[in-house]
Amino acid sequence: MKKVALTGAAGQLGRVLRKALLERGVDLRSAAGSKPLEPIVDGEDVMHGDLREATVVDRLLDGVDVLIHMAGTSVERPLPEIIENNLRALVEVYEGARRHGVRRIVFASSNHAIGMYPVQAKLELDCAFRPDGFYGLSKMWGEGLARLYWDKHGIETVCIRIGSCVEKPTEFRHLSTWLGFDDLMQLIDRSINVPDLGFEVVWGVSANTRSYWDNAGAERLGYRPTQNAEDYAAEVLAKTNPLDATAQQYQGGSFARFDFSRQDTTPHTR
Ligand code: 15L
C-alpha cells in the first residue's frame, strides 16, 4: 500500500482530506504547521513543524510515496509571507522529495493563477497565466517549480487549480468555480493512484453548467466530476451577489478586485 503524506492538515481543505483519506483506509501521515494535531484515530501518524526546515521535511517524507501538499498561504497576503510559505517552503518540499525518492506530489494550485481573465472567457488548461495577486503569482511559480522537478528530477506532480472548494455554493461566482467535496476526493484519489502521470495540470472544479474552465487535456487523470453547482442555483440566485462591480468582471472575484488601481476596471483583452 502507498504511504501518503498530507501537509496543511489543519487547514480548511486539509481537515476535509485528512478525515476522508483516513476513512478510506489510506496509510496517511498528516502534518500541520505550528500547532500539534490531535490524533483522530488510534495510533494516527501525525506531526507538525515548519516546512522551511529540512529536518521537518525529512520527517514528513520518510518512507512516503505520494505527498499531497496543501500547506502554504491560501489567500492574498503581503509578499514576504507569500515568499516564505509558498516559494521557500515549496522548494524545501521538492528538495526533500528528491532526497527521499518521493515519486509524486499533488500540488494545491489555485484558480487565482488565472484570476484576471474576464468571467466570459472559457479557459483551456494551456491558457496563459493571468495571476490576480501575489498569492496567484505564487501558484503560477509553484506550477513552474513542479514542471522543473519533473523535467530534471523525474518527480511527478499533479497541479490541481482549485476553484472554490466549499461544502456547497453560497454565492453567484461559485456557480462557475465550485469544487464539491465528492469531486475533490475523486480528484485526490485519481491523483494518488493513476499510474505514470508525469506532469499534469487539472482544473479543480465540479461539472458546473457555468464553469469557466475546460478540463479537456487532462484525460489521463480520468477525472469525471459528478457534482454541479447549478443544483444550488435557485438558492444562490435568491441572494445578493457579495462582489462589487469590478470583482464581478473577473474570474478571481474579490482577489482580482484587491489593490486594483486602474481607472477603467474592464478586463484587458490582450
Ligand atoms: C483560493 O485559492 C483560496 O485559497 C480560497 O480561500 C478561495 O478564495 C478560493 O480560492 C476561491 O477562489 O474561491
Image (cartoon, rainbow, N blue to C red):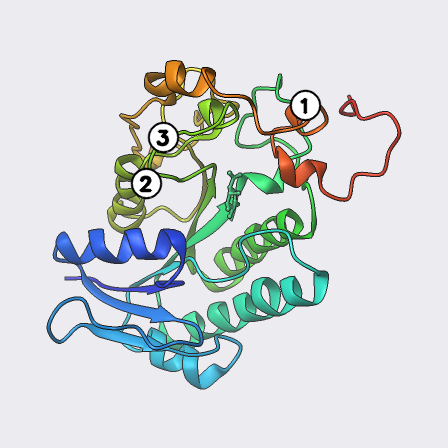
The quarter of the picture where residue 262 lies is: top right
Position in image of residue 169 (x %, y %): 40, 29
User: Looking at the rendering, in which quadrant would you find the C terminus?
Assistant: top right
Q: Amino acid at mark 3?
A: Glu
User: Looking at the rendering, in which quadrant would you find the N terminus?
Assistant: bottom left
Q: Which residue is mark 1?
A: 249
| Front-most of residues 121 and 246 | 246
| Front-most of residues 188 and 218 | 188
| Front-most of residues 96 and 258 | 258
**Pointer 1 local density, CA inside 10 Å: few below 14, some 14–19, many at least 20:** many
> Which of the two discs, 2 and 1, sits closer to the camera?
1
Give the total number of marks visible in the rendering.
3
The quarter of the picture where residue 260 lies is: top right
Position in image of residue 214 (x %, y %): 47, 24
**Which comes before the other along the chain, label 1 or label 3?**
3
**Pointer 3 local density, CA inside 10 Å: few below 14, some 14–19, many at least 20:** few
Q: Amino acid at mark 1?
A: Gln
